[in-house]
Image (cartoon, rainbow, N blue to C red):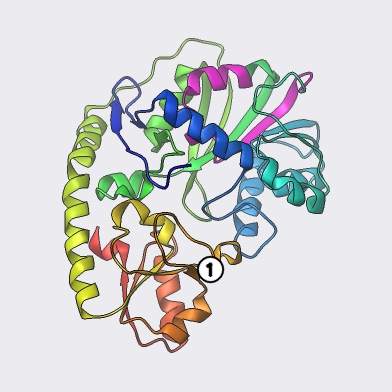
């Protein structure tokens, strides 16, 4: 697998949706990665980091449906969400292509179909189908959602979650742009994506973290995606503004590094805005990342505790969602470094 790969962004005007332009080589690389199975961000698992996301999504599902009947989870990852849904009373079928999650399936005591969706191993239809942070990974959302509908019972519900890219788009922040994400959703573009596929639904902001949740059913009438000139202009401005933002950050990084050490907290949010030629220090709260590397960067990911040992001159917190809380916690713990939020810069 290459450490770097070109990235091209485009605008789907019919859906008012930002998309990554892909090719067969990139699709092949991503398929290899998904067969291994890994979550670069916060995994949906039974940890202090992952549990609140899962609990919040289950709370959302509970607002619209009872805790009984058949449920299919697509892209089950570690299997923790499937486990929790089963504990809530659902009869759960799970599917996930990544073989690397097998130890977690065992520890979570869930049976998972190890395959891509759709699969011949899935039989029947379901009262509810869920997929958590999956749709942004799907190149052809219309075909995917059409397949989903084929497994949904009449009057059944679809519940899904995607990253909310609204703030990043409005601030010309390129940190959301990842090769494994084909689409960058706002409330408007997610609704259009559902409508295009013959679904009717509503979109809500998550109460924890920063996701968009949607609840949808099969539409009984033909609807047309709504094109918004305001959104089209904003997305076009985002595409043109990314290079300016990258140049601004690059100049800041070089200036700070010339004066001392620079630590990046939550570095996965800034990988496409940093140069591997710079000597950054990486920090993250996820134990699964500690001691590992983000190719092509040479800095090992350190823990929060290591911050108090290394004491870099400046710390840039790259999380928009939890940045203010992390900064407050670090200051209250006595860290004397100069702490900057990404929201202060972009």
| The C terminus: image quadrant | bottom left
Where 120 falls versus 240 (above or below)?
above
Where 260 falls versus 176 (above or below)?
below
Question: Magenta stretch containing residue 93, yes or no?
Answer: no
The local secondary structure at tag 1 comes to loop
Q: Residue at x 17, y 71 (%)?
A: 255
Write down the residue under mark 1: 285
- Nearest to the observer: residue 273 or residue 84: 273
Q: Residue at x 49, y 34 (%)?
A: 29
Question: Magenta stretch containing residue 147, yes or no?
Answer: yes
Identify the image quadrant of residue 238.
top left
- Point out the stretch of residues depicted in magenta: 122-148
Q: Find residue 231 and report its horizontal and vertical position in percent.
A: 26, 33
- Nearest to the observer: residue 87 or residue 221: 87
Identify the image quadrant of residue 33.
top right
Say left or right for 30 vs 90: left
- Nearest to the observer: residue 284 or residue 68: 284
Q: Find residue 138 and report its horizontal and vertical position in percent.
A: 50, 29
Where 58 falls versus 97 (above or below)?
below
Say left or right for 275 vs 119: left
Q: Find residue 32 and report its horizontal and vertical position in percent.
A: 56, 35
Q: Residue at x 70, y 36 (%)?
A: 65
């Amino acid at each position: 697998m290459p450490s770097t790969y070109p990235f091209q962004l485009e605008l789907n005007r019919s859906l008012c949706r930002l998309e990554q332009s892909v090719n067969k080589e990139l699709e092949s690389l991503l398929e290899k990665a998904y067969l291994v199975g890994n979550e670069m961000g916060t995994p949906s698992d039974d940890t202090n980091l992952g549990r609140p996301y899962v609990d919040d999504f289950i709370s959302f599902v509970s607002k619209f449906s009872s805790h009984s009947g058949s449920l299919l989870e697509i892209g089950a990852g570690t299997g923790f969400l499937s486990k929790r849904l089963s504990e809530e009373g659902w009869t759960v079928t799970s599917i996930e292509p990544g073989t690397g999650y097998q130890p977690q399936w065992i520890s979570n005591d869930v049976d998972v179909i190890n395959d891509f969706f759709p699969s011949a191993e899935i039989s029947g239809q379901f009262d509810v189908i869920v997929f958590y942070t999956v749709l942004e990974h799907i190149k052809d959302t219309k075909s995917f959602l059409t397949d989903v509908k084929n497994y949904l019972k009449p009057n059944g519900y679809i519940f899904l979650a995607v990253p909310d890219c609204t703030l990043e788009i409005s601030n010309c922040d390129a940190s959301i742009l990842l090769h494994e994400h084909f689409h960058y959703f706002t409330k408007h573009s997610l609704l259009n994506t559902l409508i295009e596929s013959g679904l009717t639904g509503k979109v809500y902001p998550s109460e924890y973290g920063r996701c968009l949740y949607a609840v949808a059913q099969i539409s009984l009438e033909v609807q047309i995606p709504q094109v918004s000139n305001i959104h089209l202009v904003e997305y076009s401005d985002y595409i043109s503004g990314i290079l300016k933002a990258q140049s601004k950050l690059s100049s800041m990084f070089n200036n700070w590094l010339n004066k001392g050490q620079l630590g990046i907290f939550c570095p996965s949010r800034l990988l496409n805005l940093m140069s591997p030629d710079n000597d950054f220090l990486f920090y993250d709260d996820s134990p699964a990342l500690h001691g590992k590397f983000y190719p092509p960067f040479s800095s090992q990911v350190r823990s929060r505790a290591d911050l108090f040992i290394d004491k870099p001159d400046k710390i840039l917190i790259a999380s928009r969602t939890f940045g203010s809380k992390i900064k407050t916690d670090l200051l209250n713990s006595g860290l004397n470094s100069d702490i900057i939020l990404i929201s202060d810069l972009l």
